[in-house]
Amino acid sequence: MSEKEHKIQGQKVSDEFYKEYYKMKRRQRYLEEDVKVGRIDVDMENEKVTFVPNKEDSLQRLMDLGADYADEQLVEDLVVDKAMLLILQEAMKELNRQEKELIDDLFYKEKTVREVAKKDGVSHVMVIKRRDKVLAKLRKFF
């Protein structure tokens, strides 16, 4: 134990544990108080008082201020869509060149299975099997 003794709920703890506990308590206080309510900062040296507003906002207040959410898509849906896109991008990195080209042809260039088969010189059944195999590989990420 260091020169300064720390106690949490009456028990002696190490400096390292106390620092982590303090960080955890400070984060909890930040989330419960600082984010939800404003606070007043007083600068004694400059004799200045500043109000720091809360960091939490409501959808209703933003709409009252004129924010446009005309598509009525929920914020949660936007976050989920963004997360899914990030997962897809990571999953695509695991595909080889041929698999990426197949996905690009079928889903981005919107070619038919028969068009891809003709371009690659294979049967459409083969393209379907390759597509299903690649999609199964991508599904593992979701």
Image: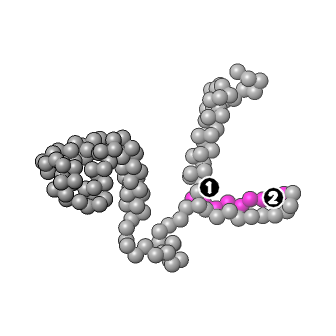
- Which residues fall within the magenta stretch? 36-44
The quadrant in which residue 134 appears is top left
State if disc 2 and disc 1 touch (CB < 8 Å). Answer: no
Residue 51 sits inside the magenta stretch: no
Which residue is depicted at the point 34% across and 44% down?
97
Crowding near the residue tagged with mark 1, few <14, some 14–19, many ≥20 C-alpha atoms within 10 Å: some
49 shown above or below 61: above
Q: Residue furthest top?
A: 1
Q: Which residue is mark 1?
A: 34
Q: Is residue 112 above or below residue 137?
A: below
Amino acid on which disc 2 is placed: Asp
Q: Tell me if 2 is positioned left or right of 66 in this view.
A: right
Label annotation for residue 53: none
Circle 1 — which element? helix
Amino acid type, callout 1: Asp
In this rendered view, identify the residue nearer to me: 128 or 51: 128
- Where is 111 relative to 121, above or below? below
Looking at the rendered structure, the secondary structure element under dot 2 is strand
Side of 142 relative to 79 (left or right): left
Going from N to C along the chain, the mark reached first, 1 or 2, is 1
The image shows residue 130 at horizontal and vertical percentages of: 21, 44
Residue 112 appears in the picture as rendered: yes
* In the image, farthest residue toward the right: 45
The CA span between labels 1 and 2 is 18 Å
Residue 123 in the image: x percent, y percent? 13, 48
Residue 37 among magenta residues: yes
